[in-house]
Amino acid sequence: MHIHVNGRNLEITDAIKAYVKEKIGKVAAHYDQIQAIDVVLTVIKNPSVADSHIAEVNCKMLGDTIRVEEKAESMYASIDLVSDKLDRQVRKFKEKSSKAKVGAESIRTGATPEEDAK
C-alpha cells in the first residue's frame, strides 16, 4: 500500500510527511484491500478565511474509492480530523462488504441468515 503526500501553497516537510504517514497508516492497518492513499494538503493564504488548512484524502480500494476532506486552524489538526473521518468511512465500508459476502454466501448455499450466524 502506497501513501502519497502532495501540497498546494505549502512545502511538505519531512515532519508533516511523517505525521501523515503515521496517522493515515493506522487507518490502512484496519483493511487490507486498500491499494493506495493520496493525501493533498492545502493552505489558503487569505487572512479572512478562518479554517485555512485543508486536508483531502482519496483512498483507493478494490472496486471503490473513498474521498474525505477536513478544514481546520492548523495543518496538524486537519490531518487528525481527516484521519478520524477516514477511519470511520473505511470501517463502514469494511462492515458493509463483509455483510454482502455473508449474504451472497447464504444465497449460494440456500441457507437462511440465522443458519449462517450459527
Image: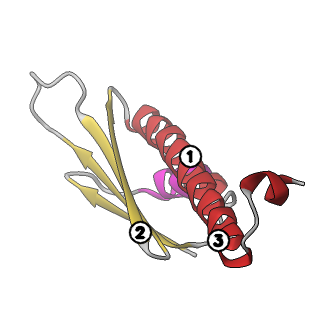
Q: Residues within 10 Å of mark 2 (few under 14, many from 20)?
A: few
User: Residue 72 lies in what quarter of the image?
Assistant: top left
Range shown magenta = 13-23
Which residue, given by chain and number where applicable, does mark 3 sit on? 107
* Residue furthest to the right: 118
- Give the mark nearest the N terminus, 1 or 3: 1
User: Residue 46 lies in what quarter of the image?
Assistant: top left
Which residue, given by chain and number where applicable, does mark 2 sit on? 64
User: Residue 116 lies in what quarter of the image?
Assistant: bottom right
For this view, does 36 lie left or right of residue 71? right
Q: Nearer the viewer, residue 90 or 109?
A: 109
Q: Secondary structure at mark 1?
A: helix
Q: Is residue 20 magenta?
A: yes
Residue 12 placement (x, y as % from top left):
37, 57
- Give the mark nearest the N terminus, 3 or 2: 2
Q: Residue at x 67, y 78 (%)?
A: 108
Q: Is residue 78 above or below residue 2?
A: above
Q: Nearer the viewer, mark 2 or mark 1?
A: 2
